[in-house]
């Protein structure tokens, strides 16, 4: 079996992995880099340019996993494309939004490469996607596997507990089982329930390592962290400020809305206005529509109706002042320049009454990553085209990551005890910590950090 890591560095970038099993060729995930631009935002497709793919399988619809799928489909017209049902629903919405963002960037960056794909191409591409139920063994031809397919390549989606539609992908071929975790969470979140993953008979485990460089603080529980967030919002409101929470449109927005809903119900906070972005509201509607069809907590909660957030967008964000007593849960989570959270942050960062709360992962070099490490009085540049500003607002961190703790990843790997573990989806310190720990804990397992772009035999 051959494997190529198609990310350009050891990083959480444009996630994509090539596998060749017998005469079948497939790609797992097809992301867009959250920071890089132009060709550098794509996975390293050059490494597989002369090979014709049979299938592309997508684990979930975060930009770093699905963001360049229309490009790969254009280059690989014969590949069948598979993903879980909810992922297909959300993926089309996100890719159309990405076309709008890239169209704007075409002028800003002065690049004719953008948009990398169009609305029409996205529509045609999504028409060809085959959406699959969880826990069903499916052949690479897209049929439900039966006894005759015992020896052929099949795949099966398992609930990854990360965001709506997220899944791990179990491949079976040549008498071996390969399991790709995608992005996973082994703990319950406020909406998402913890992952249900296969527990044994995995030969090769391809595992994410996002949180490999940070230990879970002793005594941390989600319930106490929720309480801490509620109390922190009360404090900010009392001192006459507002709270900005930078969030991903998919996942973190809905988790934050559900927490704010609970604060209102439990009288932690009185009724107060909540703002989210337009893309977030579209994805929240998908969460609501699928509430009864998906494994989740609070399945009767209809976020758009019960929380009733106000919607901000590129047109009205300019005239929206930061008003006290309000929570602005705006994307993007990394505060990428020109996004709602970035524009709004520049409005609150110099005001000591206001607060910015960080609730999840941010690339250390992204504006959110830079700001969360800033000290009072530091000058920060949130947008290279705007003036740097002094940090005077209150900054706080909360641990509501949608990714598995490193302790739970190690525990899972030890339970499964595969012959080989391939470590992906992590910054170098995270991958290195996981590698060292796994080598020590699992002497019978080969632990591999795949060099980007290099074909290897698994
Ligand atoms: Zn993700
Ligand atoms: Zn990811």
Image (spheres, grey):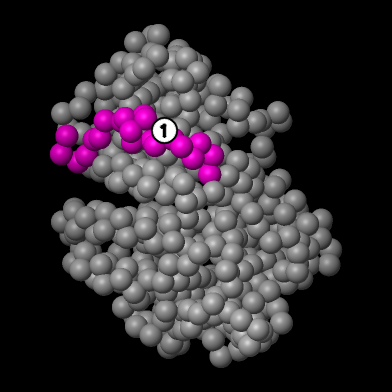
Q: Can residue 382 be seen by looking at this rendering?
A: no
Helix, strand, or loop for circle 1?
helix
**In the image, is residue 120 above or below residue 271?**
below
Q: Which residue is mark 1?
A: 257
**In the image, is residue 400 above or below residue 260?**
below
Quadrant assignment for the N terminus: bottom right
Say which quarter of the image contains residue 214.
Answer: top right
Q: Position of residue 83 (x, y in %)?
A: 46, 66
Residue drawn 31% across the image and 30% down it: 308
Question: Pointer 1: residues within 10 angstroms few (<14), some, or many (20+)?
Answer: many
Residues 313 and 387: in front is 313
Horizontal side of 441 relative to 413 (left or right) equals right
Q: Position of residue 166 (x, y in %)?
A: 50, 56
Magenta stretch holds residue 302 = yes
Horizontal side of 224 relative to 242 (left or right) equals right
Q: Position of residue 66 (x, y in %)?
A: 41, 62
Residues 197 and 43: in front is 197
Magenta region: which residues? Answer: 296-316
Q: Cβ of disc 1 within 8 Å of ligand 1? A: no
Main SS, magenta region, reads loop
Quadrant assignment for the C terminus: bottom right
Residue drawn 72% across the image and 54% down it: 412
Magenta stretch holds residue 18 = no
């Amino acid at each position: 079996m051959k494997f190529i890591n198609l990310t350009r560095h050891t990083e959480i970038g444009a996630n994509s992995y090539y596998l060749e099993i017998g005469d079948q060729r497939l790609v797992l995930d097809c992301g867009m880099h959250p920071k890089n631009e132009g060709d550098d935002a794509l996975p390293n497709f050059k490494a597989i340019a002369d090979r014709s793919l049979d299938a592309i399988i997508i684990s979930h619809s975060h930009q770093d996993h699905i963001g360049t799928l229309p490009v790969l489909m254009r280059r690989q017209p014969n590949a069948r494309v598979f993903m879980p049902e909810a992922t297909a629903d959300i993926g089309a919405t996100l890719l159309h939004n990405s076309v709008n963002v890239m169209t704007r960037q075409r002028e800003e960056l002065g690049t004719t490469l953008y948009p990398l794909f169009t609305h029409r191409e996205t529509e045609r591409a999504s028409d060809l996607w085959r959406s699959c139920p969880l826990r069903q063994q499916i052949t690479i031809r897209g049929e439900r596997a039966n006894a005759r397919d015992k020896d052929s390549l099949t795949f099966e989606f398992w609930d990854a507990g990360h965001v709506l539609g997220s899944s791990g992908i179990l491949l079976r071929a040549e008498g071996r089982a390969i399991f790709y975790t995608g992005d996973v969470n082994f703990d319950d979140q406020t909406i998402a329930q913890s992952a249900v993953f296969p527990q044994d008979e995995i030969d090769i485990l391809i595992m994410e390592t996002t949180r490999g460089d940070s230990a879970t603080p002793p005594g941390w529980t989600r319930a106490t962290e929720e309480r801490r967030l509620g109390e922190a919002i009360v404090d900010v409101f009392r001192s006459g400020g507002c709270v900005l929470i930078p969030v991903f449109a998919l996942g973190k927005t809905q988790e934050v809305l559900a927490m704010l809903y609970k604060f209102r119900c439990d009288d932690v906070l009185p009724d107060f206005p909540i703002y989210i972005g337009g893309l977030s509201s579209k994805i929240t509607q998908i969460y609501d529509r699928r509430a009864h069809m998906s494994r989740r907590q609070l399945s009767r909660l209809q976020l758009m109706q019960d929380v009733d957030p106000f919607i901000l967008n590129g047109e009205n964000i300019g005239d929206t002042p930061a008003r006290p007593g309000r929570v602005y849960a705006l994307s993007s989570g990394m505060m990428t320049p020109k996004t709602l959270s970035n524009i709004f942050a520049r409005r609150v960062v110099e005001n000591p009454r206001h607060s910015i709360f960080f609730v999840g992962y941010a690339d250390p070099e992204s504006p959110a990553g830079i700001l969360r490490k800033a000290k009072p009085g530091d000058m920060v540049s949130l947008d290279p085209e705007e003036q740097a500003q002094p940090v005077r607002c209150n900054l706080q961190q909360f641990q509501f990551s949608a990714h598995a703790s490193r302790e739970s990843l190690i525990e899972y790997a030890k339970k499964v005890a595969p012959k080989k573990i391939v470590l992906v989806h992590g910054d170098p310190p995270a991958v290195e910590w996981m590698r060292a720990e796994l080598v020590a804990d699992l002497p019978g397992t080969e632990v591999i950090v795949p060099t980007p772009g290099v074909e290897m035999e698994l």
